Amino acid sequence: MTRSKTRNFDELQVDLETAAAAPLAAPEDRRKPGRPVVQTEQFTLRITADMRKRLAGLAAREQETTGRNVTPQQIAVKLLGEALKNG
């Protein structure tokens, strides 16, 4: 192997050996993408077109203020949760 003038490949080999010896995170420790942290149940709501438009408007406002992608379903779950807390 020829020597490189700009890189030290001996140090790179040591780094690779260290990385290979390090244990990987167990699959159960990794969170699946898109899955919520809490346990959820599927639930179907049938809403009117007017309610859907209002939820979409609330989601758009929330998205503008937070800068994160917000769906009407997330707004509906949030409102339902608040209503159940307040009794």
Image: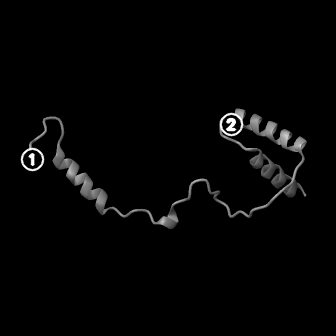
Q: Is residue 46 above or below residue 71?
A: below
Label 1: which secondary element: loop
Q: Position of residue 29 (x, y in %)?
A: 51, 64
Q: Position of residue 34 (x, y in %)?
A: 61, 53
At label 2, the amino acid type is Thr
**Colouring method of the image:** one colour
Numbered tag placed on residue 40 in the rendering:
none
Compare marks 2 and 1 and give the one earlier in the sequence.
1
Q: Residue at x 86, y 54 (%)?
A: 46
Q: Residue at x 36, y 64 (%)?
A: 23
Q: Quadrant of the C terminus?
A: bottom right
Q: Residue at x 20, y 48 (%)?
A: 11
Q: Residue furthest left?
A: 2
The residue identified by callout 2 is 66
The residue identified by callout 1 is 1
From the viewer's perspective, is the residue at label 2 or at label 1 nearer? 1
Q: CA distance from mark 2 to mark 1?
A: 54 Å
At label 1, the amino acid type is Met
Label 2: which secondary element: helix
Q: Residue at x 78, y 52 (%)?
A: 77
Q: Position of residue 30 (x, y in %)?
A: 51, 60
